[in-house]
Amino acid sequence: MLEIENLTLHYGGSRILNGIDLTAETGQVTCVMGTNGVGKTSLLKALSGVHPRSGGRYRLGDEDIGRAPAHVLAKKRVGYVPQGRDIFPLLTVRENLETGYACLPRSERRIPEEIFDLFPILKDFLNRRGGDLSGGQQQQLAIARALIMKPRLLLLDEPTEGIQPNIIQQIGRVISYLRNTGDMAIVLVEQYFSFAYDIADKFYVLERGAVQLSGAKADLDRDRLLAAVSV
């Protein structure tokens, strides 16, 4: 579903990503890990079109992606759940979910019942403003909003950050469910090692904006992987 080659990204004169090669397959969770400041969030911004990459090839399915901005990639069904969630605090839960309609034809503009099966609390809070939700509830809303657009590539940036343990477990179950449906490729940026190791099929470890270590979970030694992502 996703293949990038030699991807680079700059902020002004600073080069943040240095020739990243990465693939993500449908029906798998591909986890990007590393210590703070190595370029993980910048990678997802490049993949979502939020920040333009400086160079490299980006292939989505059977299509080469040029310099497509975020709204074009969203219509190509690239779903992005950013770090910090970025829900609309003054809109209701229902209205937040409905913002995902922009990527859908009118005939498909509805909230699937599956969303409430995955996140039951959202059904109870449909008329509550997003800013009145707890951090964990906002994270559920952010993921649900991305799912409204029926993504074939789902990008998740640290979905467990600042979230209570019971919600982390629920998010883990949701990611596993989405992987097992076989409808999308999932790229997960995550700092919580045990969560990531349990859920991922493949790992990429970044250091100074480059891939230091990569491979399928079955081919990587757990202790070596842990040492590579530890401070």
Image: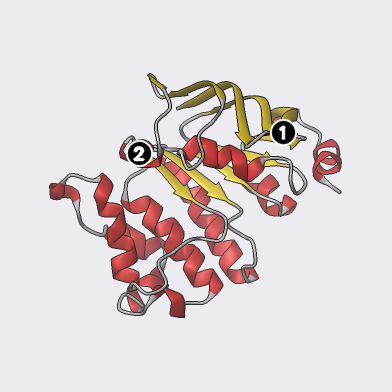
Q: Kindly indicate whether the residue at mark 1 contacts the one at mark 2 (C-beta within 8 angstroms).
A: no
Residue 224 in the image, given as x and y percentages of width and height: 85, 36
211 relative to 139 in the view: left or right? right
Q: Which of 117 and 230 is in front in this view?
A: 230
Res 191 seen here: yes
Residue 119 in the image, given as x and y percentages of width and height: 42, 65
- Residue occupying image coordinates x 31% and y 75%: 126
Residue at the disc numbered 1: 209
Give the colour scheme of this rendering: secondary structure
92 relative to 19 in the view: left or right? left
Amino acid carrying mark 2 in the image? Arg
**159 relative to 20, above or below:** below
Q: Which of marks 2 and 1 is nearer the N terminus?
A: 2
Amino acid carrying mark 1 in the image? Gly
- Residue occupying image coordinates x 21% and y 57%: 110
Residue 205 in the image, given as x and y percentages of width and height: 73, 35
Q: Residue 128 is drawn in which quadrant?
A: bottom left
Q: Element type at marker 1?
A: loop
Depth-wise, is mark 2 or mark 1 nearer the camera? 1
Res 28 seen here: no
- Residue occupying image coordinates x 80% and y 43%: 229
Identify the mark at residue 77; answer none if there is no mark.
2
